[in-house]
């Protein structure tokens, strides 16, 4: 905890001598681990996370280094209360706080195993933009002016050429981090979400950006209640050790208490990690520590084993091992930057070639046909190989798989993007695809993280849910008297390859004959919501067990044997026999009802009685 305590001491130090000593101690502390909750945790260099700009949500852009005050925030009695004696840093603008809480609530429902606290979103929002510049947002949550990071042209930062044609950042040459959560456009392209339900995905909107940040932090199957996974998730947002310490300090602070303040009244941040800006109450620039010595890149042997993609967890960048690179300056003190991914530490030296530099193209590896029914997991997995120009496989590089277009098909875990480290032969196997309810063609694109190279595009087909077998669940004869109602309701079970066929579309029609599937215009019928007779029912669906109970059937005055044809998507069919025969209405036969048909009366006609009515006498067929 030495580095973390040093930063806290620096901000609250009573003398410049103590502050200078604290910064010096932090600068000298470049250990390969950090301390979280009293234990050694992963660092930016040993998590196996990408250290190039495109491998982090922010492109490793600069961030605000302001730390919480040494005094602890007082808990508010309720979420809307304002406590005058609580330090202003504890207050979060109302709209911004609402966005964080709504995003965390959605993630709890969608990915409960992630255990994302809203306080983590608040901590990242504080460090990235000072809570949208103190809550300067409109009623819809969109910032009143653009929040842009520096140009990522490689001059002290990562070099990320333009990916959005300037749509979000206004720069058609290089990318810049955008919005209150500081997403670079290339990350927003796949991570963006619509958090306020307006049909748009806008990185300048706090609701959209907070929800996107939540999904980004949960994308690898990480459990954020686990300190190791928490550290990995934060470092994946910006691969800087100092960034990790700063976010954790605000996370701890917000967990101890916060309160709502009006939009636009929050304090503005001051000290930035690239040395620009000043601390509140000071006219002098933020002190800068000496630049760290360049760290040479070297080919690593893999470190820890990665999580098996077979377990459904996406993106194996968490523990798949080092890729043989180290960030140029990812663990530096305030003022030295958050790591530019160049490996040169800002010295201008040309870094050695990395595995990513060797990749010429991505190629498919016998993926085969990708087809699944709605709701099912695709049996076939996408496999892509990173290759040199000569076709040699390149190990330990990251391949990104992105599901594009308007579809609810996702990878296992519910995300539409997965980043996978290639194995020893250069192959990256994407997590299993899970078909949504929307049928049709789905596109999965591939990209190499860190460089633009040609890559295959995969087409997957989602077909409607189907059944191949349909049977009745009972065997009671279905008999009714004219003008009555069938007591027994028809229930069927649909299966597909022996398993229950859930939520399969079913149609039920009273047909003219076994050879004529046209709808019958007489005989048994169903009723619609208005009580009108109908003889065809569509848009029926089996339940989760493949069962479907049809509505009650009624009979008109026509006697005889009738057929009910039941069909499902996939071609399963069943014909059920219905009999309407005369009988004693005062003592109906089993399976029949004396309920009158529409337009009839149970009262005897003039000059007749129930006992003398011909319809009451048993017919020979009965």
Image (cartoon, rainbow, N blue to C red):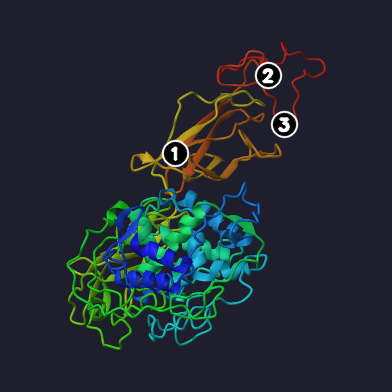
Which SS class for mark 2? helix
Q: Residues within 10 Å of mark 1 (few under 14, many from 20)?
A: many
Assign the N terminus to one quadrant of the image: bottom left
Asked whether the residues under the numbered discs 2 and 3 touch, taking CB atoms below 8 Å apart as contact, a structural biologist would say: no
Disc marking residue 615: 2
Camera sees residue 460 = no
Residue 396's mark? none
Instruction: Tell me where residue 393 appears, x and y as whole percent.
Output: 19, 73
Of the residues tagged 2 and 1, which is closer to the observer?
1
Q: Which residue is mark 1?
A: 546
Visible residue check, residue 513: yes
**Quadrant of the rendered image containing residue 609:** top right
Distance from Cα at disc 1 to Cα at disc 3: 33 Å
Q: Residue at x 30, y 88 (%)?
A: 348
Task: List the single residue furthest toward the right.
Answer: 606
Residue 349 at what x, y percent from top left?
27, 88
Q: Secondary structure at mark 1?
A: loop
Q: Nearer the viewer, mark 1 or mark 3?
A: 1
* Labels 2 and 1: the sequence-earlier one: 1
How crowded pointer 3 is (Cα within 10 Å; few <14, some 14-19, many 20+) is rated as: some
Which residue in the structure is indicated by mark 3? 598
Q: Where's the C terminus, which quadrant? A: top right
The residues bearing labels 2 and 1 have C-alpha atoms spaced at a distance of: 41 Å
Quarter of the rendering containing residue 562: top right
| Vertical arrangement, residue 74 with respect to residue 128, above or below | above
Is 259 rendered above or below residue 529?
below
The percent coordinates of residue 260 (x first, y second) are: 63, 57
């Amino acid at each position: 905890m030495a580095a973390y305590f040093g930063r806290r001491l620096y901000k609250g130090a009573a003398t410049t001598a103590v502050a200078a000593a604290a910064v010096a101690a932090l600068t000298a502390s470049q250990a390969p681990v950090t301390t979280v909750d009293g234990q050694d945790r992963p660092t930016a260099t040993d998590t196996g996370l990408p250290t190039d700009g495109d491998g982090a949500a922010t492109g490793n852009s600069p961030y605000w280094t302001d730390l919480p005050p040494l005094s602890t925030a007082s808990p508010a009695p309720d979420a809307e209360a304002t406590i005058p004696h609580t330090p202003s840093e504890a207050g979060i603008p109302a709209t911004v706080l609402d966005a964080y809480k709504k995003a965390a609530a959605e993630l709890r429902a969608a990915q409960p195993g992630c255990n994302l606290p809203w306080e983590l979103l608040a901590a990242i929002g504080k460090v990235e933009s000072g809570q949208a510049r103190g809550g300067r947002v409109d009623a819809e949550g969109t910032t009143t002016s653009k929040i842009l990071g520096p140009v990522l042209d490689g001059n002290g930062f990562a070099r990320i050429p333009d990916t959005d044609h300037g749509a979000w950042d206004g720069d058609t040459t290089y990318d810049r981090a955008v919005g209150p959560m500081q997403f670079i456009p290339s990350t927003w392209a796949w991570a963006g979400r619509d958090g306020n339900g307006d049909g748009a995905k806008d990185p300048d909107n706090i609701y959209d950006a907070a929800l996107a940040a939540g999904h980004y932090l949960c994308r690898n199957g990480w459990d954020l209640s686990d300190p190791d996974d928490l550290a990995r998730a934060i470092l994946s947002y910006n691969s800087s050790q100092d960034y990790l310490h700063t976010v954790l300090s605000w996370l701890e602070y917000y967990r101890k208490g916060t309160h709502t303040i009006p939009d636009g009244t929050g304090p503005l941040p001051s000290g930035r990690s690239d040395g620009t800006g000043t601390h509140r109450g000071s006219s002098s620039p933020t002190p800068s520590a000496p630049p760290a010595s360049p760290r040479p890149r070297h080919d690593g042997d893999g470190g820890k084993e990665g999580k098996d993609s077979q377990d459904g967890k996406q993106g194996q960048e968490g523990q798949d091992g080092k890729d043989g690179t180290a960030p140029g300056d990812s663990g530096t003190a305030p003022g030295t930057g958050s790591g530019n991914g160049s490996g040169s530490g800002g010295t201008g030296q040309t870094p050695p070639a990395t595995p990513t530099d060797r990749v010429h193209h991505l190629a498919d590896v016998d993926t085969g046909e990708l087809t699944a029914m709605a709701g099912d997991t695709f049996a076939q997995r996408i496999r892509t190989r990173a290759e040199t120009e000569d076709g040699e496989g390149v190990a330990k590089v990251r391949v990104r798989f992105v599901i594009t277009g308007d579809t609810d098909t996702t990878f296992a875990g519910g995300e539409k993007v997965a980043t996978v480290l290639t194995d020893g032969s250069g192959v990256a196997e994407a997590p299993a695809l899970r078909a949504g309810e929307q049928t049709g063609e789905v596109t999965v694109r591939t990209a190499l993280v860190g460089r633009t190279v040609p890559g295959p595009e995969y087409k997957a087909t989602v077909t409607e849910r189907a059944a191949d077998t349909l049977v009745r669940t009972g065997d009671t004869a279905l008999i009714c008297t004219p003008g009555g109602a069938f007591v027994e309701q028809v229930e069927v079970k649909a299966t597909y390859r022996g398993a229950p066929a859930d939520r399969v579309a079913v149609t039920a029609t009273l047909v003219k004959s076994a050879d004529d599937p046209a709808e019958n215009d007489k005989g048994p019928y169903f009723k619609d919501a208005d009580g009108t007779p109908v003889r065809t029912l569509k848009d029926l669906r089996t339940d989760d067990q493949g069962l479907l109970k049809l509505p009650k059937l009624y009979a008109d005055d026509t006697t005889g044997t009738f057929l009910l044809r039941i069909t499902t998507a996939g071609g399963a069919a069943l014909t059920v026999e219905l009999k309407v025969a005369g009988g004693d209405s005062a003592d109906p036969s089993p399976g029949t009802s004396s309920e009158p048909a529409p337009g009839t009366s149970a009262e005897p006609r003039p000059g007749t009685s129930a006992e003398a009515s011909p319809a009451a006498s048993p017919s020979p067929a009965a």
